[in-house]
């Protein structure tokens, strides 16, 4: 077997779970090497159950949760960049000097270039430009990853960070618009109030369906993915969007993961069911 290395680069614990957890588990189970970079420890944000963590301990607790999920998905190495969660746009945490969005571009890019050159991945996956739903850290990790992807392959830049490496493919995790519509339909069929999902539609959330290049069927990994999601206990509580659906429905929609090929430019109409 041709053993490949996949590097996923995200901002917070749990960013990896829903969009890529099944694919990571799938490729890990097939004998490939999966690496995960997480820019922060998710220090900011709601705690689903106050008995699990305090605002002071949250980063540490979420680190443990991501270690749990990584083990479940078969991740070979988990790397934290050590920045602080910047919080939602407009929150006071945006101003914290340790916040990821305040990190100098050059500093983050150098960290990522060193990781890419050391691990020599065949494939990198990160958020699409809107970061799924516009979280400032998601948008930041997108930009830094795209920059590092190209810089790692440029022999003129940062020669001291290791031998140049051209990663073969860059993918975005790209949850399509139709996914959010289907989710809403399922919730409404159960008589749930879905007003809070207006936001998704008004802001044009979701990736255009016709620009999804890969739909991975991860049905055989759905139990591992479910288990990984459930490692994120401080986030995946009763208030979580996906908890509002019955488990059986969630598992149905979890069986597919969506990606857009960002580099090289995909041939028009490319639609496949595997990442490589
Ligand atoms: Zn996130």
Image (spheres, rainbow, N blue to C red):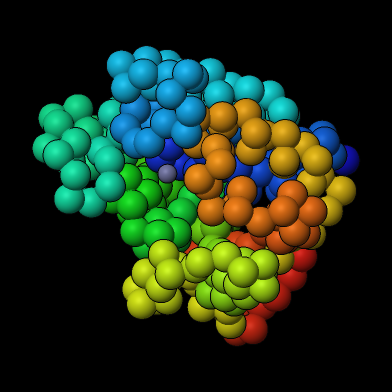
> Which percent across, then down, holds residue 22?
72, 46
- Classify the position of the C terminus by image quarter: bottom right
> Which percent across, then down, holds residue 52?
49, 19
Q: Is residue 4 above or below residue 69?
A: below
Q: Is residue 254 left or right of residue 208?
A: right
Nearer to me, 163 or 104 = 104
The residue sitting at 23% across, 51% down in the picture is: 89
Q: Is residue 92 left or right of residue 143?
A: left
Nearer to me, 154 or 207 = 207
Q: Is residue 231 left or right of residue 130?
A: right
Nearer to me, 138 or 78 = 138
Quarter assignment of residue 176: bottom right
The residue sitting at 74% across, 49% down in the picture is: 247
- Classify the position of the N terminus by image quarter: top right
- Res 122 visible: no
Q: Is residue 172 above or below residue 91?
A: below
> Which percent across, then down, holds residue 206?
48, 70
Nearer to me, 184 or 88 = 184
| Image quarter where ligand 1 lies | top left
- Res 139 visible: yes
The residue sitting at 35% across, 73% down in the picture is: 203
């Amino acid at each position: 077997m041709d053993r490949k290395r996949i590097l996923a680069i995200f901002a917070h614990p749990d960013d990896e779970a829903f969009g890529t957890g099944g694919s990571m588990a799938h490729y890990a189970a097939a004998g490939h090497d999966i690496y995960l970079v997480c820019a922060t420890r998710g220090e900011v944000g709601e705690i689903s159950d106050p008995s699990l963590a305090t605002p002071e301990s949250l980063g540490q607790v979420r680190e443990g949760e991501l270690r749990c999920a990584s083990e479940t998905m078969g991740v070979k190495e988990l790397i934290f960049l050590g920045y602080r969660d910047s919080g939602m746009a407009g929150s006071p945490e945006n101003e914290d000097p340790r916040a990821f969005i305040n990190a100098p571009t050059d500093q983050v890019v150098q960290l990522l270039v060193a990781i890419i050159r050391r691990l020599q991945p065949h494939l990198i996956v990160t958020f699409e430009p809107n970061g799924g739903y516009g979280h400032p850290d998601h948008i930041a990790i997108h930009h830094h990853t795209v920059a590092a992807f190209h810089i790692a392959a440029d022999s003129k830049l940062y020669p001291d960070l290791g031998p140049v490496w051209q990663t073969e493919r860059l993918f975005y995790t790209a949850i399509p618009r139709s996914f959010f519509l289907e989710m809403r339909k399922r919730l409404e069929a159960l008589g749930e109030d879905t007003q809070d999902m207006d936001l998704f539609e008004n802001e044009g959330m979701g990736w255009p369906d016709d620009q999804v290049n890969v739909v991975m069927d991860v049905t055989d990994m759905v139990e591992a993915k479910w288990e990984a999601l459930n490692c994120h206990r401080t986030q995946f509580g009763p208030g979580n969007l996906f908890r509002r659906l019955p488990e059986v429905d969630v598992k149905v929609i979890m069986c597919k993961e969506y990606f857009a090929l960002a580099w090289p430019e995909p041939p028009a109409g490319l639609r496949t069911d595997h990442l490589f």
